[in-house]
Image (cartoon, grey):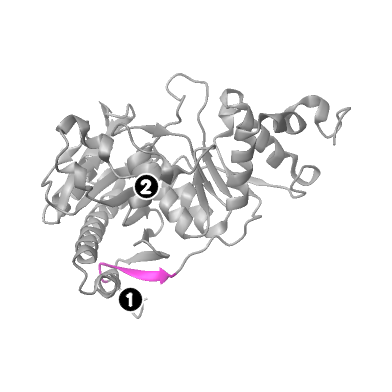
Amino acid sequence: MTHKPTLDAYLTRHAGSDMLRVAVAEVVASLAAAAIRVSEAVSLGALAEIVEEARGHNAGGDEQKDMDVWADRQFREALKACAIAAFASEEVDELEIWDASQPLCVAIDPVDGSGNLELNMPVGTIFSIMPTPDEFVLASAADRTLVWPAGTSQLAAGFVIYGPQTTLVLSLGEAVDIFTLDRRSGHFRLTQANVRLPDQDQPEYSINASNYRHWEEPVRAFIDECQAGADGPSGRDHNMRWHGALVADTFRALTRGGIYLYPADARSGYGQGRLRLIYEAYPMAFLMERAGGAGSNGRIRILDIRATSLHQRVPLILGATNKVARLETLHNRPGLWPPTSAPLFANRGLFRV
């Protein structure tokens, strides 16, 4: 692996003499350095000097663990020397203004899927890097989230998976590239360049099927089509996978194809899904689009949604463009539901078409 380019060399080559790109490169390098420390702590598990217990709930209402708070501190400290105007984290109630004159805003989920830690399953870190909007400097503290740039403005986004390997998935606005941590040298190295979704018809989907009865009808109709397999519209049998960590399920869709869904549902607190727009949905949709896929809330493109609050939630669908388009069609054209979900139109129904 030592012959593969390091992340530092990759960032230097990308930045050149462009000052904004240099600032973005410094942020990515700082995040990567902190991610190595988090990776070491995660790999130590119960041997780490972090008491892995619940600490209550974060601003978004999710259970907060010691690792969440510790990791947030690692990333925060690593970024202090960077050109950052504002910092948004899942673990902090309010948007933090560091220096409004600086060119970049950073949003981060320090430990995505932290509930997986006690099960020795993958967890990760998600981040988004935005340009500081002109109106941001003049906005009051209460209004600054309302002028947070739309997802289309992202300069870079990425995520890290702490699993059997520690992997960084990164886009600086063009291609999506994958880096693997070389523990022998302590550097991330480029292991896969220009990642593209491999197959629009990959028969694999990721969703928590136990919530089927709570979903909206369009989501049930789509999953019914998948479960119909070779007897359904796709003519192919499907496999379902679910890790319970956005980083792991998105990585699978990026590298294997298929689709990931975390829809809204009828349970209390799930009416807008559970994933956060600014520091989860924006960066993941950005990466998916750069790899030839799509990101949607089921009705419209994720990157076109404007934030109205720091911890705003959205339904999230990521993956192959044809599958995401099918879900948008089902949401926006209710007349398509009965042929796919009503018993009379099932495989052995009276009116199957």
For residue 29, side relative to residue 115 (left or right): left
Q: Position of residue 49 (x, y in %)?
A: 19, 44
Magenta range is 185-193
Q: CA distance from mark 2 to mark 1?
A: 29 Å
List the residue tagged with mark 2: 151
Report the number of discs: 2
Q: Position of residue 212 (x, y in %)?
A: 60, 28
Tell me which residue sits at (39%, 32%) in the image. Answer: 313
Q: Name the amino acid type tagged 2.
A: Gly
Q: Quadrant of the C terminus?
A: top right
Q: Position of residue 156 (x, y in %)?
A: 32, 57
Tell me which residue sits at (52%, 50%) in the image. Answer: 294
* SS of the residue under disc 2: helix
The question of residue 186 being in magenta is answered with yes
Q: Name the amino acid type tagged 1.
A: Pro
The answer, for residue 66, to whether it is visible in the render is no
Q: Quadrant for residue 188, please give it.
A: bottom left
Q: Position of residue 74 (x, y in %)?
A: 18, 48
Q: Residue furthest bottom?
A: 3
Q: Nearer the viewer, residue 159 or 162?
A: 159
Q: Quadrant of the N terminus?
A: bottom left
For residue 310, side relative to residue 301 (left or right): left
Tell me which residue sits at (59%, 33%) in the image. Answer: 209
Q: Residues within 10 Å of mark 2 (few under 14, many from 20)?
A: many
List the residue tagged with mark 1: 5
Note whether 6 is above or below 278 in the view shown: below
Note whether 55 is above or below 117 in the view shown: above
The question of residue 4 being in magenta is answered with no
Q: Quadrant for residue 91, please give it.
A: top left
For residue 291, side relative to residue 179 (left or right): right
